[in-house]
Amino acid sequence: MSDRIDHGILDQQWGVRGQSDAEQLRKTLDDALLAEELGYDSYLLGEHHLAKPAEAFSSRIPWPELVVSHLAALTDSLRIGTGVKVLSLDAAWRTAEMMLTLDLVTGGRALFGLGAGGDEPEIFRDAAVGADARRWLFRDRLGELLELLRSDGRSAFSRELSPVGDAASLVSRILVAARDDETIALAAREQLGFVMGQAEPAATSLQYADRYRAHGGTGEVRLVRIVHVAATDALALESVTPAYRLYSSYFLGLRYYQEAVARLYPTPMPVDLADGLDRMCFVVGGPERVARRLAEEGRASGASRIDILVDIPGLSTAQRHESLRLFAREVAPALRPALERIP
């Protein structure tokens, strides 16, 4: 096994039209096993509901915890977890039981990315519809969850479960995904980790990172970037362009993306390919270019750590795996000194 590198992978578990769920899941397992072989630190799995197989691509896995549990049996050192679990869909005690169980199954390797979810009335129904209501419910559930976990990992609902280490160790592996000030303040106050998604440009991410630290947060601040590495800049651009077209055909129309870039660009839609890649926060090129761009992104966003998303819909397995190998072998060592200088 290679030496560990201080970068993880986010897998949103996207499957393209015509790809079976079994094929999509096999792709996730293969990528995670390669990540461990190459020395990546962690592998986080997205949670998505109401998949739409008729779309050009969609996320397929609604219960990432089940995949995490399966991966625990296939790996030895890779930290694996959710990126992110929609906390508001379950009672806090159920989430506490899930976390304690995964902690045991993984031998203390589990990470727990938690978020409030999107505006999906079919999912939330009588719970919380609308951003403010979802965020309030998230904060309420998170407070309950922390109280349960800090009671030595025990509660009236899980008397026989306790963490592999101590409760503080388990809580330290929570990563909060948030954009509103109240939730960022809660994450900082509770000294939880903080994660910024693949959509926000660096200038927007910096606002979140600054708020987190201004509220007293001292935990890890993670930034996710879509990354594709090939032997040369030209080869990387050539291979990623069809995948970018497929990806942007859906995501450029989402309010999430439009809000993320609205204040930074003079036109609502990209004017050319380079502009589109920039708006979608794609980092594409040979190893030297990718290392340089990610160092710039780290400085501009205030992140202390960068995780990568390499499974872009439409890329082949060979292209994904070559990107993972080049990143581990050439990009990560060049990037380390730049990130170590970020608070």
Image (cartoon, rainbow, N blue to C red):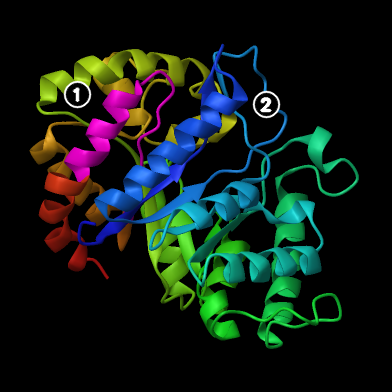
**Residue underneath mark 2:** 51
Chain part drawn in magenta: 306-327
How packed mark 1 is, by other alpha carbons closer than 10 Å (few <14, some 14-19, many 20 or more), is many
Q: Is residue 52 above or below residue 120?
A: above
307 part of magenta stretch: yes
Q: Determine whether, in the image, residue 235 is placed left or right of residue 61.
A: left
Q: Residue 98 is drawn in which quadrant?
A: bottom right
Q: Nearer the viewer, residue 212 or 198?
A: 198
Q: Is residue 319 above or below residue 132?
A: above
Residue type at the position of mark 1 = Ala
Label placed on residue 236: 1
Query: Residue at 86% of width from left, 49% of height from top?
Result: 127
Label placed on residue 92: none
Residue type at the position of mark 2 = Ala
Classify mark 1: helix, strand or loop. Answer: helix
| Mark before the other along the chain sequence, 2 or 1 | 2
